[in-house]
Amino acid sequence: MALPRPPRGSTRSDFLEDDVPDVAADPSDSERLHAISFGDLIDKAIAGRTPPALSSDERALLEVATVLRAAAGEVELEGVRQDQLIEEALDAPSRAAADERRGPSSVLDVPELGARRRRALPWLITGATSAMAAAAMAALWLRVPHERLVAAPTPTPARWSSRPADEVVGEIRRDASGDAAARLDSIYADRLEGYREVTLFQRGGPR
Amino acid sequence: MSSHPEDPCRGGPAPRRWPRRLAAAALVSLALAAACDQDGEPRLSTRLAEPSDVPAESADPRLSEQLMVALAQAKNFHHRAKVLMSDGNPGEAQRSIRAILSLRFPAGAPEGDDVRADARALLAKLMIGRGELDEAARVIEEGLAEARRDSFFIANLYTVKGEIQEAMAAVAEAQGASGHAAASSHRREAIRAYDASIAINSAIQQRLFEGATP
C-alpha cells in the first residue's frame, strides 16, 4: 500500500516554503504522493520505527504531528518508563527526609573525606560518650552525702537480744504448769523472728 | 587550602587533637561535679540501729545460732516426751526431759535458765504422777538452787513444789495418827511455796507492766 517516497533531492522537499495551494483546487498527484508518504512516516514513528535520517521539513512536520497527538491525549508511555516514574514518585518523600536529616552540608558529604578519618569517627564518638559516662559516675561518687550523726542511734530493739522469756509466756497458771512444750514453742518462735532479722537484714549480709 | 592544618575535611594533625579535647572535657566535668558537692556542711542524718550494734559481750548478748540450736533441741525433746507419755511410757519420757537439762546453751543466756526451769517443773510433775515424791522434791530444789533471778518459770517451780508438798501431806495423812504432824508440816510447806510463787508472779507482772508503760 505504501507508495515510494519522493527522492531526496526533489524540489518537493521544500514544499513548506512554496506558496500555499488553492484550497478549492484538487490535490495534485505529487501532493497525494507526499501525503501518503507522510502518513506512512507517522505510522512508523508511532510504532517506534522512526527512520534515522529525515529531511528537516519532514522532521518538523513529524514533531508537529507528535505534539498534536500528545495534546489529544492519545500518547501512552511504555511500561518500563511508567514503572520508573512511579518508583521515583514513591521514593520522593524518603529522599526529602534524608536530605533534611543530612542538612545543607556536612563533613560526611565531602568527597575528599579521608579513609582514616572515616575509620576514626566511630572511635571518637565512643570515646566521647565513655568520657561523659566516666564523668557522670565520678560525679555520683563525689556527691555521696557525708553522714554525720546528729542524734544517738535509735535504741537497739530488744528482739535482737537474748533475754528472759517472761513476757513471751506470761504468768504460768497452776493447771498449765506442766505444759512446758507449748511454752517452749512460743519462745522459739519469738526468738526465731529476731534471729532472722539479725542474720538476714543487717548491713553487710549474714554473719 | 587543602594543606591547611585545621581543615577538618583533610588529613593532617587535626584528628590527633580529638583525644586531648575529650580528656579536657572529662576533666571539666569532674571539676564541675566536685564543685557542686562543695556546698558547705555535710548532710545531717540520724543513723538507725543495726543488729551489729548489739555487742556480743553485753548483758543481753545478741541472738545466736547456738541459742537457736539449743532451743530447737529442747523443743524436740519436749515433743518426744509428749509422744512417749501418750504412748504410756513415762519412764522414757522422763529421760527425754532430763536430756533437756544437759543441753548446752550460750553462757549466761536467760532462755537457757528458763527452759531448764520449765523442764524441771515438768519432770517433777511426771514424778508426782508416778509417786516419786522425794525425787520430785529434789529436782525442784536443784532448780531453785540454780536460779539466778526471779521469773515466771521459778514461780512455776514453787507452784510444783507446793503440789509435791500437798502430795506428801496426803501420803502422811494416809499413815494415820502417826503421820498427822508430818502432814501438817507438808501443808505449811506447800502454803509457803504457793505464797512464794504468788509473790514472784506479782513482782514480775508489776515489773513488766511498768516496762510496758511509756
Image (cartoon, grey):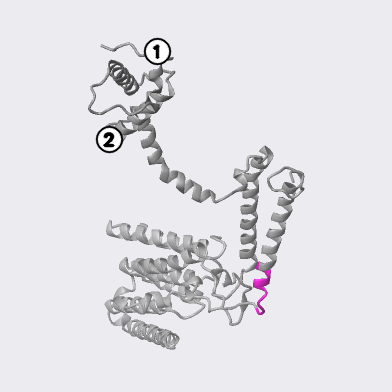
Over which residues does the magenta segment extend? Answer: B33-41
Residue type marked 1? Pro
The C terminus of chain A sits in image quarter? bottom right
Residue type marked 2? Gly
Q: Secondary structure at mark 1?
A: loop
The N terminus of chain A sits in image quarter? top left
What residue is shown with label 1?
Answer: A7
Magenta-span inclusion, residue B40: yes
Q: Are marks 1 and 2 on the same chain?
A: yes
Question: What is the x, y in percent for residue A148?
Answer: 63, 77
Residue at left offset 28%, top offset 12%: A2
- Residue A155: numbered disc: none
Can residue B104 be seen?
no
Residues B26 and B70: in front is: B26
Question: What is the x, y in percent for residue A158?
Answer: 49, 75
Magenta-span inclusion, residue B195: no
**Left or right: A91, with A120 as reference point:** left
Residues B50 and A27: in front is: A27
Can residue B7 be seen?
yes
Residues B129 and B120: in front is: B120
Upstream in sequence: badge 1 or badge 2: 1
Give residue B159's quadrant in the image: bottom left
Whether residue A130 is situated above or below residue A159 in the rendered picture:
above
Whether residue A13 is situated above or below residue B188 in the rendered picture:
above
Question: What is the x, y in percent for residue B43?
Answer: 61, 77
Whether residue B135 is situated above or below residue A61 in the rendered picture:
below
Question: What is the x, y in percent for residue B165?
Answer: 35, 78
Q: Check the residue under mark 1 and report the chain it is in.
A: A
What residue is shown with label 2?
Answer: A73
